[in-house]
Amino acid sequence: MNNFQLSLVKFLLNVIILFGACAIVYNIFLTYTTPQKLLNKNSISFLPPKKVKDYHVWLIFTKVTERSPLRYKFHNLLENILNISTVSLKFHIIVDNSSKYLATNEISDVVSHSNKPIYYKFYDVEICAKAIEDIVEVLTPHFSSKPGIHTTVFKYYIYIFSILGTYYSDALFFISLGLYRIAPVSQTRAVLLDCDLYFKQDIRLLFEEFSRFKTTALYGLAPELTPVYKHVLQIYKSKHNSTFGEYYHLKNITSHMPHPKGFQGYNSGVVLINLSAIRNSKEYSVIIKNETVTSLTAKYKFRGHLGDQDFYTLLGFEYPHLIQTLHCGFNRQLCVWWRDHGYRDVFNFYFKCKHPTVILHGNCNTKIPK
């Protein structure tokens, strides 16, 4: 082999070595996949065909003190969701001035322990309350702990308590019904959660339920798992043969009603909200008016005390096309108060849930088994 051929071979070998080194550097430094990226890649196959682009979670954190139980529930829920979620979430938190500081501390603590970032934004509760003032005015006389208050008196009540800065307490019970006015227009759907929840499975599963919504559905809720509405409707049911307030049967118990197998009502601890559909719904804007609500409550002799949940229950029975019923595993309530207050004989028929549990709900301060 002459000198020219020897030089050519060395050159080619150097080129091969150089390309090999570049390939190694590229694979190590430019295409390295972190465990979190691997997790996201593996989860893609589980997403619905119509992939949710943004995962917006709304929480309410107001009237909180240093030792308030809500503070610990808020902390535990954030930590739980971050640890089990495979999707990037955006938290939107309604706060008052005094609670905002505590919320910031809890978020910082969760981030430091989980080593995971949290995207969050605060919303002033008084501004939110002002945005839905007309809705609160219509619904509070029918669905609060002080039902029956005259509209004129209620307007005076709003005026007095808005001066004192405490009016928003009532508005909190109806935030979900007016969230379409509070959330940025860019948000097309959102989930509103109580803080007394524990996710046993990925929150992504909850957002996937949006892809199963009927084309007419504005909200998605799971059933109420107690006989509270059997109790609320006892005057109406004493004069009408209705499935309203009855537990779900395996077979039809009537053939001429919208809910032939029974209708337990809804629980608002977990609410899926189709924001864009509500903003465009002329029907909803009519239903939320005083005339419609007054007519509905009078028809069913309905005197509730659970805020938005009462309205959803009425809406679901009278306008079933507007609500998507989630299975009970998405809001597996644990409260057994009604079992010990007059309904022991039927309680288990309401309380049963044969679906896999995604979310546990420790309502009425029930301890959540983890």
Image (spheres, grey):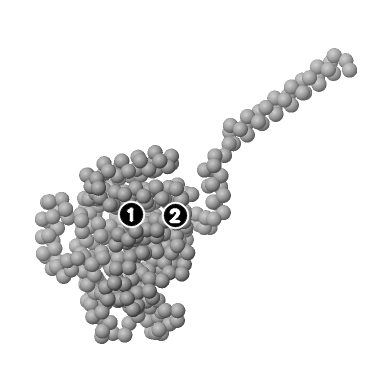
Question: What residue is disc 2 on?
Answer: 203
Which quadrant of the structure image shows residue 304?
bottom left
Report x, y in % for residue 102: 27, 43
Looking at the image, the residue that sits furthest to the right is: 1
Disc marking residue 195:
1
Report x, y in % for residue 168: 20, 54
Tell me what residue is drawn at x 22 percent, y 54 percent.
129
Amino acid under disc 1? Cys
Q: Nearer the viewer, residue 157 or 218?
A: 157
Left or right: 91, with 3 as reference point: left
Report x, y in % for residue 71: 29, 49
Where is 156 relative to 31, above or below? below
Amino acid under disc 2? Ile
**Dot placed on the residue nearer the N-terminal end, 1 or 2:** 1
Label 2 residue SS: loop
Which quadrant of the structure image shows residue 276?
bottom left
Q: In the rendered image, which quarter contains the N terminus?
A: top right
